[in-house]
Every structure is written in C-alpha cells, then in structure tokens.
C-alpha cells in the first residue's frame, strides 16, 4: 500500500447542522509551503466534486496559480470524497452533511492545529468555489480575499436539475438497491460520465472539435477515454453524498442568515473575484452577475468570466494553457489587493 501523503484531523463527535451527531468525524488535509511566523500567508484551497487533494494540486507550484514558496496552502478534502469521512469509510447510515458543516470543521482545523486566524485567500473551483463563498460569508473578518471559480453562492435550480440527471444515470444501475449501492455500478458509472460530458463542456467545444487538441482521434474516442471511467475511481455512495452536499449548497441556509441570500452576501467583506466560465452550462455566469450587485460591503468585487469554450472545465484547466494563464493572471492581481 502506498504511503499516505496527507494528514487527518480528528474532529470528534460533531453536531451537524441537521442536529445529527456524527461520531468521530475525520477531515483529511494536505499542506504545501511554510506557515509564516505571523501566520498571515495562508491560502485555503477546498476540493471540488469527487476530487481528492492530489487531483487539484497541479495548480500549486512556484510557477503555478498558487505559489508554495510564498504561501502556506491548505487543501481540506471535502466530506464524501473517500479520504475525509464518507459513506465508504464510515458506518451506515451516512447522514446529510452541508457546506456549513464542512466549513465549521475546516475552521477548527485551521484554529486548533495551526493557530490560524487570517486567510490571505480562499480559492476554489466548482464545489470548491461554493465553499470559498461560504467561507467569505461565514467568516468575513477572517477572509481577506476569495476567488470563486465556476461556483456560486447557492445551487441554482438549473444546476440542481443537472445533478438530478447525474443521479438518475448513476442510480439506474441495478447495483442500486434500497437507497444505496451494494456493489460497483459499472453501467451507472458510464451513464453518469456520458451525461456529465454533455453538461461539462460547451456547445462550441464540440462544434469546433476542441477535443482534438488533447490528442483524441474522434468524438467517441474522447467520450470513452475522457468520460466513461471518470467517476469509476470513486465509490458510488460517496458520489451520491457529495451530490447531496452540492444540491443543498446555499450560503444563507443557516441560523445566521435565515435563508436571506441578500443578507448573507452583504455580510461579505473580502476582496471578491467571481470567475465563472463564459460557457459554463450549470454554474451560469448570470448567477454571478446577480450576486455581484449584492456584495455591497465587499472591499472590492469583480466579475471576470474565463473567455473559453471549455465550459465548466475552463475553471480546472489541467492541460489547457490558455485558460490556465488567464486564471493565473487574475489570481496574481487579486493577491496584490
């Protein structure tokens, strides 16, 4: 077995937002760089849907978007991703968790393990971007800057419907019985990947056959190699748990804001960078446009869409130099504020 390259924060018995007690809740995390004596060089980088820290650390490097030679970067693995507490490593039944639950435990990690009280930046893509938004609203005096990349303050109805299609594709597999998967849903993984392929990339991406830039020889080759097995690396019950967190995502859905989104957005004081993908089909630019005008107490708030045909994946441009360069320049500018 490979040596574990991450740490575990034992949160103990945690009362969740739902009122349920989660026994021995665990948060897996990894750090990069060195914490400054003043503890003021911290970047929090939460994970996205189905991702584990090593899936997203490509962005960290001396010449990367996030520089570990200057900053102390912490990646907390979101619950349900197979490393932090998830259905695959916890006793059944697995309770409903929320982004609010995740941020509460992440806050404890930073405070109890590192003595961190200030964040130079919270950076996140997709579900990570939703966490960045939650951080900015829930801890306005702690977060100096937040970069919401292809994310939003709450899961929009259209986004919710997209996730319903993903759930339907996955749970249509006969391995799904009595509300959970009893074995690996081979057909379900493939169906989920095919549904996701249509939503994640844009009309223009397929029209212009941009998959050829990545070395695929045909559309079918792209779908088979890029999507059919994408989600098979994760436990299917874990995927459902994370979809639930995503669908329930809403920064105002807590006692502090009582479901009032305007109030939650007005609580934010950070420098805010909203960076949707110009052609993202489920984290739509229009949601960020609506949010922008309500960030009335932010130190600054800008909306800079990524000019790309790569849809939602423009925000995670692992092998896409153009989009990567755009994001790098935007984050450099944000960190200068």
Image: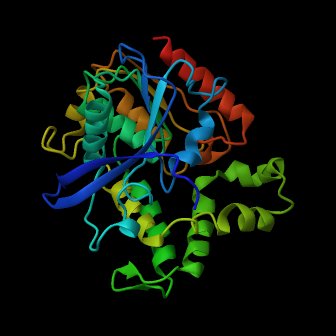
Q: Seen in the image, is 283 located left or right of residue 319?
A: left
Rendered view: 183 above or below 91: below
Q: Seen in the image, is 284 located left or right of residue 116?
A: right
Can residue 315 be seen in the rendering of this structure? Answer: no
State the image coordinates of residue 74 (x, y, percent, origin top left).
Answer: 44, 34
Q: Which residue shows up at 35% across the image and 36% down it?
A: 133
State the image coordinates of residue 252 (x, y, percent, origin top left).
Answer: 23, 42
Rendered view: 129 above or below 203: above
**Which picture quadrant has residue 197?**
bottom right
State the image coordinates of residue 209 (x, y, percent, origin top left).
Answer: 80, 53
48 or 158: nearer the eye? 48
Q: Which residue shows up at 63% across the image and 39% down it?
A: 58
Rendered view: 300 above or below 6: above
Q: Seen in the image, is 165 located left or right of residue 112?
A: right
Assign the N terminus to one quadrant of the image.
bottom right
Q: Which residue shows up at 76% across the image and 61% down it?
A: 222
């Amino acid at each position: 077995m490979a040596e574990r390259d991450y740490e575990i924060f034992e949160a103990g018995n945690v009362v969740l937002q739902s009122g349920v007690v989660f026994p021995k809740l665990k948060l897996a995390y990894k750090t990069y760089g060195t914490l400054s004596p003043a503890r003021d060089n911290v970047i929090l980088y939460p994970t996205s849907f189905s991702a584990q820290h090593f899936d997203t650390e490509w962005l960290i490097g001396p010449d990367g978007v996030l520089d570990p030679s200057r900053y102390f970067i912490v990646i907390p693995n979101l619950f349900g991703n197979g490393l932090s507490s998830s259905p695959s490593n916890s006793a059944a039944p697995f309770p409903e968790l929320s982004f609010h639950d995740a941020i509460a435990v992440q806050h404890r990690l930073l405070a109890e393990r590192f003595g961190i009280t200030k964040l130079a930046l919270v950076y996140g893509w997709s579900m990570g971007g939703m966490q960045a938004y939650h951080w900015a609203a829930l801890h306005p005096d702690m977060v100096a800057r937040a970069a919401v990349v292809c994310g939003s303050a709450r899961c929009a109805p259209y986004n919710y419907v997209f996730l319903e299609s993903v759930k339907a594709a996955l749970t249509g597999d006969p391995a799904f019985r009595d509300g959970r998967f009893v074995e690996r849903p081979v057909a379900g993984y493939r169906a989920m990947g095919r549904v996701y392929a249509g939503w994640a990339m844009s009309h223009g991406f397929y029209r212009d056959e941009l998959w050829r830039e990545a070395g695929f020889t045909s559309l079918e080759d792209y779908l088979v190699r890029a999507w059919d097995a994408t989600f098979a690396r994760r436990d299917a019950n874990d995927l459902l748990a994370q979809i639930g967190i995503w669908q329930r995502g809403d920064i105002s859905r807590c006692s502090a804001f009582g479901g009032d989104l305007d109030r939650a957005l007005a609580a934010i004081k950070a420098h805010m960078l909203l960076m949707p993908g110009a052609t993202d089909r489920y984290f739509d630019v229009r949601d960020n446009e609506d949010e922008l005008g309500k960030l009335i107490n932010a130190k600054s708030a800008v909306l800079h869409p990524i000019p790309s045909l790569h849809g939602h994946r423009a925000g995670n441009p692992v092998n896409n130099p153009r989009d990567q360069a755009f994001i790098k320049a935007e984050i450099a500018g944000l960190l200068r504020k």
